[in-house]
Image (cartoon, grey):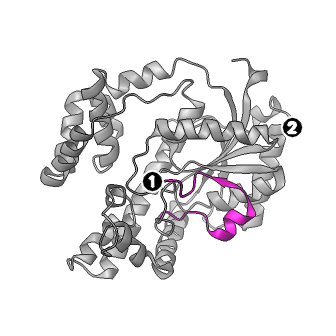
Amino acid sequence: MTADKKITIVTVAGPTASGKTACAIALARRLDGEIVSADSMQVYRGMEIGTAAPTAEEKAAAIHHGIGILSPGDTFSAAAWHSFAVETIDGICARGHLPLLCGGTGLYLDTLTKIGNYREESSGDEKLRAELYATAERDGNPALHAILTALDPEAAAVIHPNNVKRVVRAIEICKTTGHTKTEIDRMQRTADSPYREYRLLLTYHDRAVLYDRINRRVDQMLSAGLLEEAKRVLGLSGDTEPSQTAMQAIGYKELLPYFRGECSLSEAADAIRQSSRNYAKRQMTWFRRSDGYRLYCDTADGVMRPTEEIFAEAYRVVEACLRDPTACQTLIEPSIEE
């Protein structure tokens, strides 16, 4: 696809608790944009607190798409998100508005910008999937990951053993298509993307500043009613069935030992903080491999910058890119090699 026919999208990406939502809203209000969520957990209803989904006030400040559109029991994949995002972006453009993607699920974003014709590898096998989850429950996550290592060592090298959902999916692909996930990924990357993306990557000089934000947000979630929400989505309130999605989601699975009387609330909260910090670290590693403008939210000596200053820089960069796509290349930094 020629450059002049590409659809322009702006992306605000980065690790959890980095300030993506507020930044995207600020841009949407100034650039007449609509926000498309690229968060694999915020698509689920009833998990607003634990997934830090936009509040009612934030959704009133800018149009959001892809928030709370599924029940926790529904399955959702990168391919399903890709289809949803393509249709949503088309609608936003038809209204004459700017599509603004916002989220920390890097794989979702890459289906639009790095993969030309992303498609579902297979519809999956419900029986096989249940067996694989049972294996993880019975024998542990490392045992399940070992199965993937034997089938697709390249995929196993980049999927963490504790990311059970992705491990299961990769094994499913191998067993139902006859191809490894790695092989299919390579085939899907042969077509050109129809999008011209300007990506803002929110990041931090001092990781401790981000980790402090994460720790404080967990406290805010608990104060906002995370325990009650977790009981409901985990099927412990008596009026709902347990959700496999919630069982794997940070902020919920760590509370199970507390509900079972196996640890204190303080210990469970510490586990949520640790899981969230580990997730942020993985996200930062992922986005180091992305091209984009690295917008530092703290100073070089680790002091958090004023919010309005961050927003002003974000607007300056995006506005410059939209005004002159050629000149914007001087603002975009390449991926950082490990």
Q: Is residue 221 above or below residue 168?
A: below
Return the disc, 2 or 1, that comes first in the chain's sequence.
1
**Percent x, y of residue 220:** 51, 77
Residue 88 in view, yes or no? yes
Q: Magenta span covers which residues?
A: 51-70
Query: Callout 1: helix, strand or loop?
Result: helix
Residue 77 shown left or right of residue 255 in the figure: right
User: What is the quadrant of residue 88 in the picture?
Assistant: top right
User: What is the quadrant of residue 274 in the picture?
Assistant: bottom left
The answer to which of 72 and 258 lies nearer the viewer is: 72
The answer to which of 70 and 314 lies nearer the viewer is: 70
Mark 2 is surrounded, within 10 Å at the Cα level, by few (under 14), some (14 to 19) or many (20 or more) other residues, namely: few
Q: Residue at x 77, y 65 (%)?
A: 308
Whether residue 311 appears in magenta in the rendering, the answer is: no
**Percent x, y of residue 3:** 75, 22
**Percent x, y of residue 266:** 34, 81
The disc label shown at residue 281, or none: 1
Disc 2 from disc 1: Cα separation: 34 Å
Viewer-side label of 2, 1: 2
Whether residue 54 appears in magenta in the rendering, the answer is: yes
Q: Pointers 2 and 1 in contact (CB under 8 A)?
A: no
Q: Residue at x 19, y 36 (%)?
A: 147
Q: Residue at x 32, y 76 (%)?
A: 237
Amino acid carrying label 1: it is: Lys
Amino acid carrying label 2: it is: Arg
**Percent x, y of residue 230:** 38, 71
The disc label shown at residue 323, or none: 2
